[in-house]
Image (cartoon, rainbow, N blue to C red):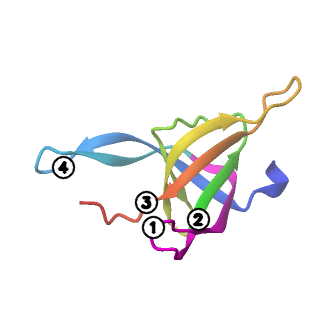
Amino acid sequence: MLGLANASVSVLRGTDTDDFGDETDASTAVATGVPAAVVESSKVVLDQATQTPRTVRSLTCVMPSWADVLDTDRLQDQATGRIYIIESVERQPSLGYPGDQVLTLKRDTGDGP
């Protein structure tokens, strides 16, 4: 996996409370410099209601088995500063040695309500 890494990421964990008492994501890094392979793929699908072609993009990340990552964490690309929300964490099958972790990501654009 390390030969395929195209990014170095920080794992962000935890929550905080804003001035209004709402829970927000904290930017506490529990690990930095973790090698990762982040890949964006896309496919064109047909919207059944309007018969309009739509492009669906998905982000996948592969990280080493030793990385402490939870599906409630976020990742920050150290080179670009982009933040990704982790939607799922799965282990690749392997014989003997623990397989790499495969994460499904969503880009955090920060335009939420």
Which residue is pictured at 67% across the width and 64% down the height? Answer: 41
Residue 28 drawn at (x, y percent): 41, 45
What's the mark number on residue 57? 2
Q: Earlier in the sequence, mark 1 or mark 4?
A: 4
Is 29 within the magenta? Answer: no
Question: Answer yes or no: do the residues labelled 4 and 3 have beta carbons within 8 Å?
Answer: no
Q: Give amino acid for label 2.
A: Arg
Determine the main secondary structure of the stretch shown in magenta: strand
Instruction: Say whether disc 3 or disc 2 marks the residue closer to the N-terminus.
Output: 2
User: Dot 4 corresponds to which residue?
Assistant: 18
Mark 3 lies on residue: 108
The residue shown at (52%, 74%) is: 51
Q: Position of residue 75 (x, y in %)?
A: 52, 51
Whether 93 is drawn above or below 25: the answer is above
Q: Residue furthest left?
A: 20
Amino acid at pointer 1: Ala
Q: Position of residue 8 (x, y in %)?
A: 65, 57
For numbered disc 2, what is the local secondary structure?
Answer: strand
Q: Which residue is mark 1?
A: 49
Marks 3 and 1 sit apart, C-alpha to C-alpha, by 28 Å
Q: Amino acid at mark 4?
A: Asp
Residue extent of the magenta highlight: 32-55
Name the kind of residue labelled 3 in the image: Asp
Does label 3 or label 1 sit earlier along the sequence?
A: 1
* Label 1, label 2: how far apart the Cα atoms are: 20 Å
Number of the label disc, if any, that sits on residue 36? none
